[in-house]
Amino acid sequence: MAAAAAGGVGVAAAALWSEVNRCGQNGDFARALKTVNKILQISKDDVTALQCKVVCLIQNGNFKEALGVINTHTKVLTSDIIAFEKAYCEYRLNRIENALKTIQSASQQTDKLKELYGQVLYRLERYDDCLAAYRDLIRNSQDEYEEERKTNLSAVVAAQSTWEKVMPEDLGLREATYELCYNSACALIGQGKLNEAMKKLQKAEELCRQSLSEDSDVTEEDIEAELAIIHGQMAYIMQLQGRTEDALQLYNQIIKLKPTDVGLLAVIANNIITINKDQNVFDSKKKVKLTNAEGVEHKLSKKQLQAIEFNKALLAMYTNQADQCRKLSASLQSQSPEHLLPVLIQAAQLCREKQHAKAVGLLQDFADQHPASAAEIKLTMAQLKIAQGSVTKACMILRSIEELQHKPGMVSALVTMYSHEEDIDSAIEVFTQAIQWYQQFQPKSPVHLSLIREAANFKLKHGRKKEAISDLEELWKQNPKDVHTLAQLISAYSLVDPEKAKVLSKHLPSSDTMSLKVDVDALENSHGATYVRKKAGKLTGDNQQKEQGQGDVKKKKKKKKGKLPKNYDPKVTPDPERWLPMRERSYYRGRKKGKKKDQVGKGTQGSTTAGSSELDASRTASSPPTSPRPGSAAAVSATSNVIPPRHQKPAGAPATKKKQQQKKKKGAKGGW
């Protein structure tokens, strides 16, 4: 009876295994999983059944459950048996460090483990090791996945060029697919070869369209979705080239497609925020949400994630979210204590709050703790001091940067600032220190000689003639054939010691040796000459004589007789003051015309000046006690011969009266 029962179980198990095999071939892993569970009910420690269950769970995307099965049955599923499946589950669950340990602990490194090892190294950004792993795989394997391995290899090279600034070597990969073209373009972007990269991306777009259009099931929307990452890189190149409008347009087109790649969306949103800067803040705040999508941290490199966080902190500063800005920048500083940017963001926020002293103190503390970044920090501190108007303190900070003291740019900046403060001694000291450095380390450097010359010119400009002479003598000693330096030296000595200047002037070359061999005729006939000589054949006889006789005196032109006035009388002596303006002549008595006009009609309507009372006929003795009715003829005849003020005219007014009568006649046509 027992034997019969055992035989029945064996038959049932065989049937179940047949069904598992059939489901596996058909790709029906959900049904296969149910069948495997039935087998495990019969034999719970069956190694093969447990392996099949893990594979089915992986195929269905249940990585966490698959890893739980592996960890539960560690005695049965040893690392040698299930190493690949365990490492793959950890990789897909973004437990990259655990996956690496699992791979390294495996006793036998199969091709599958090596393939996964390369992926793990890439995610850990260990690009050198990753490159070596893929090279070994390509060299020692030959199957249908060779093209994918080459694509991964080119991706590693692109990452090295972009994030580590390593000059990529030519791997001899034939760019037959759009993925290879895309990776090659990314490597060129890392090298700064933007135009070449754009051409590669255009080629990748063509190859992508060709390969996808061959499949009848692929729609135009599917093609555009696949091209989104290529178009994103094109927009990035446009942004680097300063074509921000074109880049923005392309970025927004990609966002409208709503691609499923959260990493691509996060990068595009971040790039739009960098274009907006402190403008269009509302749009930037909407784009920030795309950078916070779930799973973004597993899709991007550490530097990409860091850049996004930096931009979030800057956006918080631009939107006056001081607490948020401080929180983000502090978090960034704790993650990367040696990174300079979080400290600069904190200092900028303090400056916006008018706490300049606190910002300078923060920068000073960071410079003391991280000497490698001290130069950049001190430059920022100097800029803050200049903004506050403390130019002298800014100079002190700049002079404390020992590795930059001798640089021409630093010397120029310090001299300019000290000159602005009228501290000539400090400016000369800056020159002296820089010259001494070059004298010690690079005595034959062109910069050394240039600094000596600039120091001499500066000293001459500010009256330090003797010191300038010392510098010029040093220059002339190093190059005795330098005529320009000798001329400067003679000029300087002429202000201090004329005799010495005469002695030195003997070293100047003669005028014959310094004369330039110039073909005057060729120069005059050259294109662009303002004066073009006439050809000899076209010269007239008179002109030829003028050309040949250079010593002849030019004939004087006859002066034209001046015109006399029409009323000129030769018998009358001209007025000796006729050349003076009328007001400056001795007999000028002022303007006569319009005297009475100045006295009458001033003030409000109807009022008169004090002098007008004399002209008022009503105040004369001969005038009647009552005023005549205005406009009546009798009233006019009844008065005496005294003319009313409005009708009085100055002497010599008949012409004016005549004009008025003419005007009245003309006005009669109006219908009075």
Image: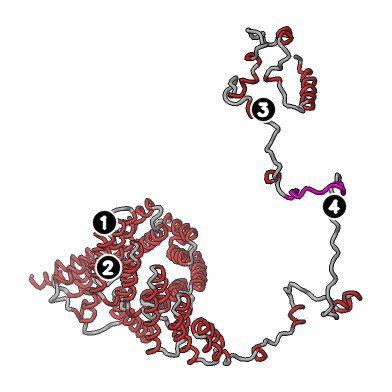
- Residue 574 rendering spot, x and y as whole percentages: 80, 49
Residue position marked by numbered label 3 in the rendering: 596
- Residue at 61% from the left image edge and 91% from the top image edge: 509
The residue beneath circle 4 is 563
Q: Which residue is mark 2?
A: 363
Query: Taking 274 as reference, is 512 above or below it?
Result: below
Q: For the residues marked 4 and 1, what is the alpha-carbon distance in whole angstroms?
A: 91 Å
Which of 393 and 117 lies nearest the eye of the viewer? 393
Q: Residues within 10 Å of mark 4 (few under 14, many from 20)?
A: few
**Mark 3: which amino acid?**
Lys
Which of the two discs, 1 and 2, labels the residue nearer the N terminus? 1
Q: Earlier in the sequence, mark 3 or mark 4?
A: 4
Q: Which residue is mark 1?
A: 324
Check if residue 578 falls in the magenta segment: yes
Residue occupying the point 35% across, 67% down: 391
Q: Secondary structure at mark 1?
A: helix
Give amino acid for label 1: Gln
Q: Nearer the viewer, residue 126 or 638?
A: 638
